Image (cartoon, rainbow, N blue to C red):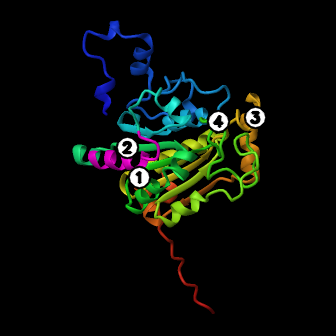
Amino acid sequence: MSLDYVKFTPGFEKFMPKEYRDLVEHGPFGKKVGVPQMGTFKELLEEHPMCAGCAMTLFIRLAVIAFPNPEDTITVGTAGCGRLALSQAAIPFVYGNYGDTNGVASGLSRGLRLRFGDRPKDVVVMAGDGGLADIGFSQVLHSWLRKERFTTIMLDNEIYGNTGGQESGMTNRGVVLKMAPLGKKFDKTNMVEMAKVAGCAYVARVVPSKPSRVASTIKKAVLIAREVGPTYIQAYTSCNIEYGIATDKVLEDAKNVEDERYQFSEYITEEAKQYLAQQHEYKEYQVKPSVNKPLEVGA
């Protein structure tokens, strides 16, 4: 968990696979790269076993690019499609038992702070709606209530896509699925509002069709979680297999869903704004000094 772990042991460079040499020499470790530079550096996630056209994979790819310090970041996941890609990324990944991700992340975050002091060591949970809104909801909520300082990202494909197409708490009311033939009987769980009520310092809802926005929200969430408190991002990552979306229509679907019911939203507390204002790249949060105009004396 530092730049040292990606460096070559002297004398062994020539024996390392080309892919690893490329990662060390051209990867994002210790550099400031982002979405605009994609294609000019070796990405942390390239090959994966996900379905063709999967929006979740695109989102995860953008997420790891957005991490402020990837060499000092641990991701936590669980059963579900997302871990198939997360476990292939060139950063540490911890697999938590189903429903335990935020408990595992709490221990990791606290332990890293004790071990490394003031050096930033970021913990990011990335799991599906089943792992976070259903089976893992208790641990998610209590990590927020305890003000644990790490980021939770929901990969919201609105279904149990990895186990055959059952409805989840994030499935929309009335939707008929092959494992829910009568349609869902109740509304989608409002995790965004619950995150606000539970005290998250930053909450955002995004779709993957706007890469720069995705990267911006994730970077802010990770930075705020370092010093202020828990942060939450909810990302629409459609399951094109279970919802029958053609591979070449996945991003078009994301744009349509954003327009219809998944509009971008961003919530940030005053304390989080003040923290971002201290970071030189977030000038929009800096308080501008007021200019008092001289009083005009009437004739």
Residue receiving disc 4: 164
Sequence-wise, the earlier of marks 3 and 4 is: 4
Q: Residue furthest bottom?
A: 299
Whether the residues at callouts 1 and 3 have beta carbons within 8 Å, the answer is no
The reply, left or right, for residue 27 in relation to residue 53 is left
The answer to which of 236 and 41 lies nearer the viewer is: 236
Which tag, 2 or 1, sits closer to the chain's start?
2
Q: Earlier in the sequence, mark 2 or mark 3?
A: 2
Q: Main secondary structure of the magenta part?
A: helix
Disc 3/disc 4 C-alpha distance (Å): 16 Å
Is residue 187 rendered to the left or right of residue 193? Answer: right
- Residue bearing the label numbered 1: 225
Q: Amino acid at mark 1?
A: Ala
Q: Quadrant of the N terminus?
A: top left
Residue 61: image quadrant is: top right
- Magenta stretch, residue numbers: 96-111
Query: Which numbered disc, 4 or 2, marks the residue that appears first in the sequence?
Result: 2
Give the residue type that dot 2 points to. Answer: Asp
Report which residue position mark 2 lands on.
122
Q: Give how far apart the Cα atoms at labels 1 and 3 are.
A: 35 Å
